[in-house]
């Protein structure tokens, strides 16, 4: 959920500030871009150099550096707008009070007041300070502003006392944020089935009938659905690219019959199915058990038709399910794709044309036309398959009532 997200980490003056270094590492590991802002007091606990080395970005703590001869200043409004989310950890009792009251006396508070993105805060203080009614009041007030509270944990405190108040462990903080983002995501609680890649239809133990599909488009769609919080199953053909999200349940298949079995099993429990695989339409009727030797004569292979998986799922589709297929057409493309949509009872056909430059098998880019049941065609211009996957998914999400 944090992959590609811009995270602004605010660190305030608590002994737990040293743990901010681990928070930065976990955020970077999760794929986030991180900028750190310190309060002046935080600099007594952790050095800007450590945090800038880990975050790979300059660490800021003041509006204006008097030593800067060019007179540049750190614009709190720009920083607030840059962030997809702000995480204030550790958040001292002093900072909680300033956030609640709107006291804007340092760069971090200026950024906090300017930001429109979600703000998470993880308090850190001694147990009696944590128990104090003013702390409870401030936390409640911040929650009423929509800020997200990451509760403190229990354990040994810097004072030597044992109790609640220490900042949640860095790993738990990052897990909390990921989990929260997931629950906010548009496809949280939905199951999505995607298929991708080619199929290989055996001729004998060492040869097969296949095609040039790389699986890139389908894998990008599976990743996009995962980023929207869905539980994703990806039925993936041989030699395809692999998804970059551990949460995706990948089921490797080789043949069209295996792909059919996986899709038939998974479809009943899926809310959305996107069939992007290049399934071989035919398979050798009787694959040889041993390698076929040359005989000096013609070799004739008898082929039989594979099941049309998309059409099969279209027949079983319920009112609540959304089914999308792809089409590759060389002539009368839109008309033929619309016929395919009706014949296979899909809700969407994503039309590729192999003649367009930079599109189709093997390329990182694609250009498609979306053909929906009740709408006119919508063209998505040539772009990276990952960006295209997001646009296709946006279209699907806006077409269904979640
Ligand atoms: N498809 C499928 N099972 C097959 C063949 C295709 O599920 N045996 C799916 C593909 O995954 C794609 C859609 O059907 O989502 C369209 O594939 P395409 O090859 O363009 O169309 P076909 O139905 O095979 O028709 P034709 O080749 O005759 O154009």
Image (spheres, grey):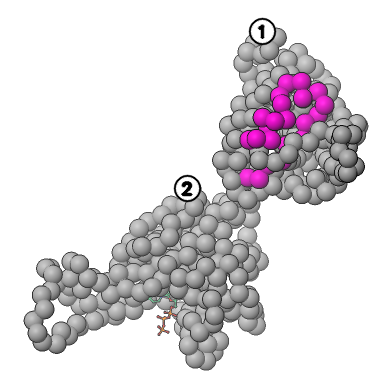
Cβ(mark 1) to ligand 1 < 8 Å? no
Task: State the mark number for residue 160.
Answer: 1
Q: Quadrant of ligand 1?
A: bottom left
Q: Nearer the viewer, residue 32 or 221?
A: 32
Residue, far left: 295
- Residue 394 in picture, x, y percent from top left: 63, 65
Range covered by the magenta-colored residues: 32-54
- Kind of element beneath mark 2: loop
The quarter in which the C terminus is drawn is bottom right
Cβ(mark 2) to ligand 1 < 8 Å? no
Q: Going 15% across and 84% down the picture, which residue do you hit?
A: 299
Q: Residues within 10 Å of mark 2 (few under 14, many from 20)?
A: few
Q: Nearer the viewer, residue 49 or 208?
A: 49
As drawn, is 18 to the left or to the right of 352? right
Task: State the mark number for residue 246.
Answer: 2
Whether residue 71 is visible, yes or no, is yes
Above-or-below relation of 204 to 97: below
């Amino acid at each position: 959920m944090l992959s590609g997200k811009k995270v602004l980490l605010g660190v305030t003056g608590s002994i737990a500030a040293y743990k901010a270094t681990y928070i930065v590492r976990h955020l970077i590991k999760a794929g986030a871009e991180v900028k750190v802002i310190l309060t002046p007091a935080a600099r007594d606990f952790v050095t800007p150099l450590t945090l800038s080395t880990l975050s790979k970005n300059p660490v800021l703590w003041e509006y204006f550096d008097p030593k800067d001869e060019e007179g540049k200043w750190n614009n709190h409004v720009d920083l607030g707008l840059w962030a997809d989310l702000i995480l204030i950890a550790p958040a001292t009792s002093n900072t909680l009070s300033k956030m609640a009251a709107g006291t804007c006396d340092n760069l971090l508070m200026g950024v906090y007041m300017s930001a429109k993105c979600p703000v998470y805060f993880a308090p850190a203080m001694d147990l009696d300070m944590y128990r104090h009614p003013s702390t409870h009041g401030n936390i409640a007030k911040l929650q009423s502003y929509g800020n997200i509270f990451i509760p403190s944990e229990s354990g040994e405190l810097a004072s030597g006392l044992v109790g609640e108040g220490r900042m949640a462990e860095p790993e738990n903080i990052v897990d909390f944020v990921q989990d929260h983002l997931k629950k906010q995501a548009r496809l949280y609680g939905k199951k999505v089935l995607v298929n991708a890649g080619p199929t290989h239809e055996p001729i004998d133990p060492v040869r097969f009938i296949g095609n040039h599909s790389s699986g890139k488009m389908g894998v990008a769609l599976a990743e996009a659905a995962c980023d929207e919080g869905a539980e994703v199953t990806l039925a993936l053909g041989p030699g395809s690219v692999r998804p970059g999200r551990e949460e995706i349940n990948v089921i490797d298949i080789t043949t069209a019959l295996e792909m059919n079995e996986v899709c038939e099993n998974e479809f009943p429990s899926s809310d959305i199915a996107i069939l992007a695989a290049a399934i071989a339409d035919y398979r050798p009727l009787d694959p040889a058990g041993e390698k076929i030797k040359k005989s000096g004569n013609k070799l004739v292979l008898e082929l039989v038709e594979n099941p049309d998986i998309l059409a099969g799922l279209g027949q079983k589709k319920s009112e609540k399910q959304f089914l999308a297929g792809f089409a590759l057409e060389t002539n009368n493309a839109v008309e033929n794709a619309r016929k395919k949509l009706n014949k296979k009872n899909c809700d969407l056909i994503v039309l590729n044309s192999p003649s367009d430059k930079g599109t189709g098998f093997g390329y990182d880019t694609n250009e498609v036309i979306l053909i929906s049941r009740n709408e006119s065609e919508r063209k998505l211009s040539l772009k990276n398959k990952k960006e295209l996957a997001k646009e296709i998914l946006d279209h699907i999400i806006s077409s269904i009532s979640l």
